[in-house]
Image (cartoon, coloured by chain):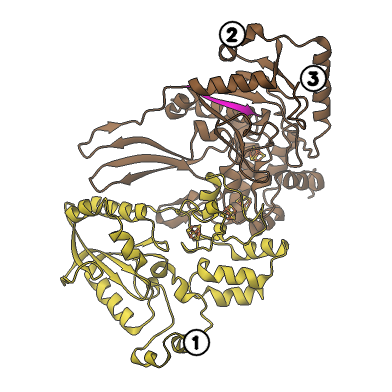
């Protein structure tokens, strides 16, 4: 494929993943040569309708208008890539599904909140088929470029599915759980960030979202055995390491 | 075998000089009880009394990630070069020396020996260093507590707790001609150990013998595993395991890898191999989303089975050297030796 028609769309999120693309300064020219951008509000006001080969969609579905845009994009795109952890798993917005979204809205926006409707935060896959997931908060630049390059070639992007612990041990870090008795979500979290945080002595918060087979109970049990309260572990897990909707299950299973 | 003596000062001088002509890697501390093989900086920084590094020397011959070849948009392929200089690994303990020997066997066992492994191995020189076991070591049980060969030089430190004594002396065994050459002109000037010093070396070996706290009878392991494939223990381990894969990544003899292609915007690509582990869900996942080992219990059982039965049947000995890394690194405390003890102790002979 010589040129790929691409659209970049944002639902509710911080736009950090779109920014990652703009931050690919050294590669932007090469990208521009290979990609025909049909929609990228953050970078250009040009908006072209019609079919696109690849849609990158950032953010989670938190408002009716997010859902409408998502459905419209899905209808136009041959491939839909969930861009970032919010799009893949719900992210921070979906952190605690027990809270009433209306109350959250009021807390954040006060009476201004009356101007728009919201709904419980969900990842894209709740509503539409997602072809590829590119997790990260924000996504790793190399993986974004790799994804674009693979799609250009007509092959499948392969993003790591192993946990952050694998990255962490390959860097031969001190394990914060074993050596420092901290709560680290590395075993539950998708790797590919080269264990950015534990490498700086900060426990992994799980910002890349859960691995496909995250064993919450096992993590809970072994941390509890080390004297960490279940409430603390649950809180850490809910931040990022669980997919939307997991909170209630954690409650049921562990409280 | 000739045993020479080298003083601490001579050792320092030797390493200082060696680091100018080869890529010298030594055990370096990286926090409480954590060590890594890293490039030599100064003699004062390396830790001669370390117990184990996070990753074993395998990372030098079979790196976590390795580009096998690059393919330019024109279609031309190139294989990345390795540095021309030798890579000398100083301070390798017997378990790890035996680990490399197992890798040597494995990577040369195919119709075609693994070329990528061989070329890294060809530039690797191994300088051994004696050690005292900690509570996770069971190399003695696995018959890997000493290395008869597989090193170029081997340093015995019979007083490892005491590193700063001015008159400190190491005993050096020569393993290969290359080792002899590495010591260069020193080999002739270094004095040989006196009989009473060899006596002290023997005493140290006995002291070391009695320092092991873990014990395991490896002869029963294949049988224990084969007979107890349906044991509820595996389900319990499956519940406990996080499938983080760290036990396997850190194992000196685990050799599984994945191969994938990466692409760049210009249309070039690279074929890359990286470490994989049977603990991961994707490891045994095939087309159609079928998985040969979907449950953690099956995966952890596979690891034990492969080490003690599968590998042993193919190569005549188990692929475990008793280094204790999998025990030390497992966040949930799954204990290699205890697993076997519980399989063997309580349930042999078969209960039915
Ligand atoms: S510090 Fe965290 S990510 Fe690293 S090995 Fe330990 S648990 Fe895993
Ligand atoms: S270590 Fe964890 S929190 Fe840090 S960047 Fe990686 S996934 Fe995110
Ligand atoms: S199985 Fe465990 S003890 Fe045996 S060699 Fe591997 S890491 Fe070391
Ligand atoms: S290190 Fe422990 S928790 Fe991780 S995969 Fe191995 S046995 Fe399971």
Residue underneath mark 1: A100
Q: Nearer the viewer, mark 3 or mark 1?
A: 3
- Across and down, in percent, residue A58 comes to 34, 69
Q: Are marks 3 and 1 in contact (CB under 8 Å)?
A: no
Residue underneath mark 3: B201
Q: Are marks 3 and 2 in contact (CB under 8 Å)?
A: no
Q: Which chain is yellow?
A: A
* Magenta segment: B86-92
- Across and down, in percent, residue B256 comes to 51, 40
Q: Is residue A16 above or below residue B284?
A: below
Q: Which chain is brown?
A: B
Determine which of the numbered discs, if any, sits on residue B4 in the image.
none
**Quadrant housing residue B191:** top right
- Across and down, in percent, residue B254 comes to 57, 38
Does the closest atom of ligand 3 sit within 8 Å of the Cβ of label 2? no
Name the residue nearer the viewer: A209 or A138: A138
Distance (Cα) linking label 1 and label 2: 79 Å
Q: Is label 3 on the same chain as label 1?
A: no
Residue underneath mark 2: B185
Name the residue nearer the viewer: B198 or B352: B198
């Amino acid at each position: 494929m010589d040129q790929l028609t691409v659209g970049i769309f944002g639902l509710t999120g911080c736009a950090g993943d779109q920014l990652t693309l703009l931050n690919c300064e050294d590669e932007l020219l090469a990208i521009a040569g290979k990609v025909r951008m049909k929609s990228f509000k953050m970078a250009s006001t040009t908006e072209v309708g019609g079919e696109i080969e690849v849609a990158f969609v950032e953010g989670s579905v938190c408002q009716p208008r997010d859902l409408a845009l998502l459905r419209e994009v899905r209808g136009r795109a041959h491939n839909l890539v969930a861009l970032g952890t919010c799009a893949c798993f719900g992210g921070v917005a979906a952190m605690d599904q027990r809270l009433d979204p209306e109350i959250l809205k009021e807390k954040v926006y006060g009476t201004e909140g009356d101007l728009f409707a919201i709904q419980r935060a969900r990842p894209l896959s709740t509503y539409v088929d997602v072809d590829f997931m590119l997790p990260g908060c924000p996504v790793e630049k190399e993986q974004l470029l790799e994804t674009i390059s693979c799609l250009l070639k007509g092959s499948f992007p392969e993003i790591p599915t192993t946990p952050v612990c694998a990255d962490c041990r390959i860097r031969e870090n001190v394990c914060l759980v074993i050596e420092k008795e901290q709560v680290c979500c590395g075993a539950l979290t998708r790797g590919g960030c080269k264990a950015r945080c534990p490498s700086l002595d900060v426990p992994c918060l799980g910002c890349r979202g859960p691995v496909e087979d995250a064993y919450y109970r096992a993590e809970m049990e072994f941390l509890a055995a080390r004297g960490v309260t279940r409430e603390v572990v649950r809180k850490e897990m809910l931040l990022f390491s669980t997919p939307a909707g997991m909170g209630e299950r954690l409650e049921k299973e562990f409280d | 075998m000739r045993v020479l003596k080298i003083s601490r000062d001579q050792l320092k001088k030797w390493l200082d000089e060696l680091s100018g002509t080869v890529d010298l890697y030594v055990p370096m501390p990286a926090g409480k009880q954590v060590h890594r093989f890293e490039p030599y900086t100064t003699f004062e920084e390396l830790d001669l009394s370390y117990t184990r590094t996070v990753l074993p020397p395998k990372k030098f011959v079979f790196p976590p990630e390795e580009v096998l070849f690059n393919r330019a948009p024109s279609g031309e392929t190139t294989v990345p070069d390795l540095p021309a200089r030798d890579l000398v690994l100083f301070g390798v303990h017997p378990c790890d020396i035996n680990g490399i020997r197992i890798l040597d066997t494995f990577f040369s066992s195919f119709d075609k020996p693994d070329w990528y492994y061989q070329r890294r191995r060809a530039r690797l020189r191994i300088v051994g260093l004696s050690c005292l076991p900690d509570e996770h070591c069971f190399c003695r049980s696995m018959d890997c507590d000493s290395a008869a060969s597989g090193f170029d030089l081997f340093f015995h430190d019979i007083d490892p707790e005491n590193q700063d004594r001015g008159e400190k002396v190491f005993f050096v065994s020569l393993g290969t001609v290359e080792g002899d050459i590495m010591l260069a002109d020193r080999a002739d000037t270094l004095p040989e150990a006196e009989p009473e010093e060899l006596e002290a070396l023997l005493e140290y070996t006995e002291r070391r013998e009695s320092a092991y706290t873990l014990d395991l009878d490896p002869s029963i392991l294949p049988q224990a595993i084969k007979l107890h494939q349906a044991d509820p223990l595996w389900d319990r381990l499956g519940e406990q395991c996080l499938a983080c894969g760290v036990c396997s990544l850190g194992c000196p003899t685990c050799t599984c890898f994945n191969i994938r292609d990466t692409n760049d915007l210009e249309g070039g690509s690279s074929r890359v191999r990286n470490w994989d582990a049977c603990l991961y869900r994707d490891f045994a996942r095939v087309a159609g989303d079928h998985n040969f080992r979907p449950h953690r219990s099956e995966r952890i059982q596979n690891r034990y089975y492969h080490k003690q039965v599968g590998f042993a049947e193919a190569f005549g000995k188990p692929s475990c050297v008793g280094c204790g890394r999998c025990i030390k690194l497992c966040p949930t405390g799954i204990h290699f030796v205890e697993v076997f003890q519980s399989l063997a102790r309580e349930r042999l002979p078969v209960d039915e």
